[in-house]
Image (cartoon, grey):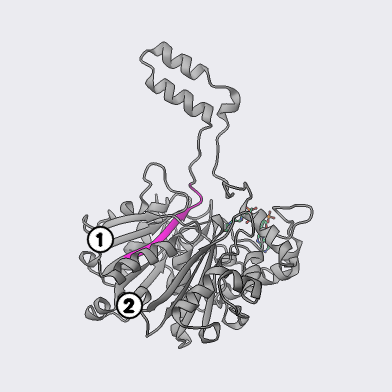
Amino acid sequence: MATFGNGRRVAIVAGVRTPFTKAGTAFKSLSAIDLGKLCVAELIQRTSLSGAEVQALVFGTVIPNVVAPNIAREVALMPLLPKGVQAFSVSRACASANQAITDAADQIALGHIDTAIAGGAESLSNVPILHSQGMAEALVLASKAKTFGGRVRALASVRPKDLVPITPAIAEPTTGETMGQSAEKMAKINNISREEQDHFALRSHRLAAAGTADGRLIAEQMPVYVPPRFESVVESDNGIRSDTSYEALSQLKPVFDRKYGSVTAGNASPLTDGGACVLLMSEEKARSLGYEPLGYIRSYAYAALDPGEQLLQAPVLAAPVALHRAGLTLRDIDLVEMHEAFAAQVLSNLRGFESTYWAERAGFSEPVGEVDQSRLNVMGGSIAIGHPFGATGSRITVTLLNELRRRDGQFGLMTVCAAGGMGFAMVVERG
Ligand SMILES: CC(C)(COP(=O)(O)OP(=O)(O)OC[C@H]1O[C@@H](n2cnc3c(N)ncnc32)[C@H](O)[C@@H]1OP(=O)(O)O)[C@@H](O)C(=O)NCCC(=O)NCCS
């Protein structure tokens, strides 16, 4: 048993998520705020929690709604929760839900609060489409103009090129490199072949399909009746392909480097909509309310490297620190959950765990070690299940803890890579 940061031990009492659906499909009529509200309401109902117990709600999202940027507060303003629940939103790219969970856990460990809901949501079906600079300036001038003629003159300054809208790119602002290009670069630097990537993607789909068929993944999901007519219900992730094959994957054309590349739509995580959240409590509070927690946070760590280097390699720097803080080594870990942004990234991270070079960069002399494949992402990962950026960290946390319990394991390690060259790792424990 350990408490991180010398504070109180933090329990992850329960967790739930919406199904994850490919962007532009089943959930296209739902915003990230809607998806967040749905899973938080389900969490409260599943745990029979009185809303009055909740003292804070922390939520992550990557592409915020420009009209309602504090998604956490919007989610908190739901009928099941009192209006006095303080709420704040966090952004740490694909590790945003992890940031939400650790921020809430820190508050509990410090003794400021006892109970919090944390998680995240993303709707990549509903990304804001922006006006160009020229169009935006003309609209501002027109809105300030005092006369009709002034408004017409301002709008007349718009040129055809100004009418082209701007959509947010999944690219690094500092380097201009997209995530996919970064994955290509990492595949080349770390000698990850197309074959390895496709085999890893196939594994992700097979394991996720098995976890869905036997109900383990379904248990983490809630059914969602889709507005506005509420006639259709989504009960499970819609991106998992039980019928995919190595042959089908190997035929797909590379997307980000069409000539020499190896990253395809099949071995990358898809653009996805979904929400996920967990209920956190101090150990004492959970006990006093009679809950049997899924597990406890033992340690965590964040790390970052130059985004122009290997953008998605920082989990390799975070994991040894989290293990060190937990007083454990990889040999003690029963299950490992790694976010799969791309097969090339997971395989690069795994190579990094075995390398003395990366160990030394993280400040250690010994590498983390080789991850036993039979303990890794045992129900598949983001490639098959999907990756709503702001929600993924919460999904991984719950999957890891549920599966640890089923296998009667004690310790779990999770890692998440994130834009900006950042990485996250957390060690959880049962009992
Ligand atoms: C890679 C990407 C561009 C693909 O987008 P897309 O073209 O809309 O993807 P689709 O789902 O339509 O798949 C493209 C094709 O591959 C096929 N395909 C995808 N996965 C497959 C699989 N596992 N098996 C067989 N075929 C597959 C699809 O059926 C589709 O075929 P079609 O064109 O004949 O219909 C998009 O998913 C993406 O940008 N992903 C990366 C997200 C990212 O950067 N995440 C950040 C991580 S931190």
- Tell me the element at label 1: loop
Q: Is residue 398 visible?
A: yes
Residue 70, position as x, y percentages in the image? 35, 50
Q: Is residue 216 visible?
A: no
Q: Quadrant of the C terminus?
A: bottom left
Picture quadrant of residue 287: bottom left
Picture quadrant of residue 331: bottom right
Residue 124 located within the stretch drawn in magenta: yes
Q: Report the mark closest to the observer, 1 or 2.
A: 2
Q: Quadrant of the N terminus?
A: bottom left
Residue 265, position as x, y percentages in the image? 66, 58
Q: Which residues are magenta?
A: 117-126
Q: Is mark 2 within 8 Å of ligand 1?
A: no
For this rendering, which residue is in front, 90 or 157?
90
Is 243 displayed left or right of 82 in the figure? right
Residue 301, position as x, y percentages in the image? 46, 69
**What residue did someone put label 1 on?**
80
Of marks 1 and 2, which one's residue comes earlier in the chain?
Answer: 2
Residue 250, position as x, y percentages in the image? 75, 65
Magenta-highlighted stretch: main secondary structure? strand
For this rendering, which residue is in front, 38 or 104?
104
Say which residue appears at 48% left-offset and 62% top-offset.
95
Compared to residue 222, the image places residue 430 above or below, namely below
Residue 9, numbered circle: 2
At label 1, which amino acid type do we have?
Leu
